[in-house]
Image: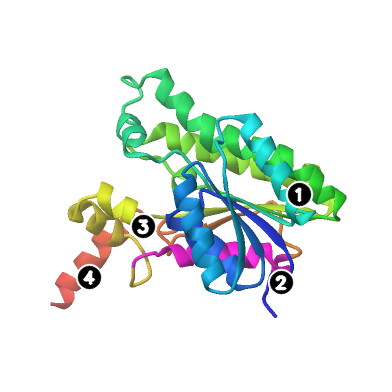
Amino acid sequence: MGLVEGKVAIVTGAGANIGEACAKMLAAQGASVVVADINLAGAERVADEIAAAGGTAMAHMVDLGDEASIAAMVAAVVERYGRIDVLHNNAANTGAGQMMKDGSLTAMEAEVWDAAFDINTRGTMLMTKHVAPHMIASGGGSIINTSSGVSILGDVLNPAYSSSKAAINALTRNTAAQFGRANIRCNAILPGLVLSPVARAQMTEAQLGMIQRHVLLPRESVADDIAGAVLWLASDLGSFITGQIISVDGGICHHQPHYADMLDMMAAMQG
């Protein structure tokens, strides 16, 4: 019996990358998974692959910038399955065009800032708004938001993205407080750099190496690292965990800033 046997789970942004891994892991552990994405072709591919592996899934297009689209998807899920037990708010606006414009605050167009918050924060809020009543009606559930390690750290790039993710941390705690007595848990996962095909395509080897020097564990992060945390929080193993902001980043956000330089110095001394 799987860890989420019999549960109904929605995963947004599940047509590729981290969302795909989360949807597949939840399905492999017994959940009926709604593969939600603005890219319907990607969602259908993932749903078909889940079904081919013996799982249960449905694909549905959702535009997180459009509340009517969100409401329609949630209604379709309830009509088909009768309940929603898990919501993984994973989707974000991380397209290359958006992220390349998300740089200097003094040069940033307001539209770039708004585009980050529109999908990343407002979209997460609207998904919660429309799903929570169904969780309440069925006795509870688990909401898992994807934040980011950059939500708790300063950086020289992507202030709109990191600020929108910091807002998700606050939204997570507020959601946990508002719905806890209805047996709804809400937690946020903070990934570090997860080397999806999209991430690799957007970064040079020098950039990847620079970041990897600060990961405490001796390997790169993969999408299944995040999926494992989502599964834990979705399952009854996490039944008394709520309002938490959990880093799943190999320790990159939790060491002295001179960590990599110190390792280099120690290696030189030993050499």
Camera-side mark, 1 or 2: 1
Name the residue beneath numbered marker 1.
78
Q: Earlier in the sequence, mark 3 or mark 4?
A: 3
Q: In the shown orientation, is residue 49 left or right of residue 137?
A: left
Question: How far across and down, in percent of the image, does residue 31 sit?
Answer: 67, 66
Whole-number angstrom distance, CA of label 3 to CA of label 1: 31 Å
Tell me if mark 1 has few (under 14), some (14-19) or many (20+) residues whose alpha carbon lies within 10 angstroms of its own.
some
* Magenta segment: 220-238
Camera-side mark, 4 or 1: 1
Report the amino acid beneath label 4: Met
- Tell me whether the residue at label 3 lies in contact with that at label 1, contact meaning CB atoms closer than 8 angstroms: no
Camera-side mark, 2 or 4: 2
Name the residue beneath numbered marker 2.
5
Identify the element where label 3 is drawn: loop
Tell me if mark 2 has few (under 14), some (14-19) or many (20+) residues whose alpha carbon lies within 10 angstroms of its own.
some
Question: How far across and down, in percent of the image, does residue 257 sit?
Answer: 35, 53
Identify the element where label 2 is drawn: loop
Name the residue beneath numbered marker 4.
266
Whole-number angstrom distance, CA of label 4 to CA of label 1: 58 Å
Report whether residue 271 is seen.
Answer: yes
Whole-number angstrom distance, CA of label 1 to CA of label 2: 18 Å
Name the residue beneath numbered marker 3.
196
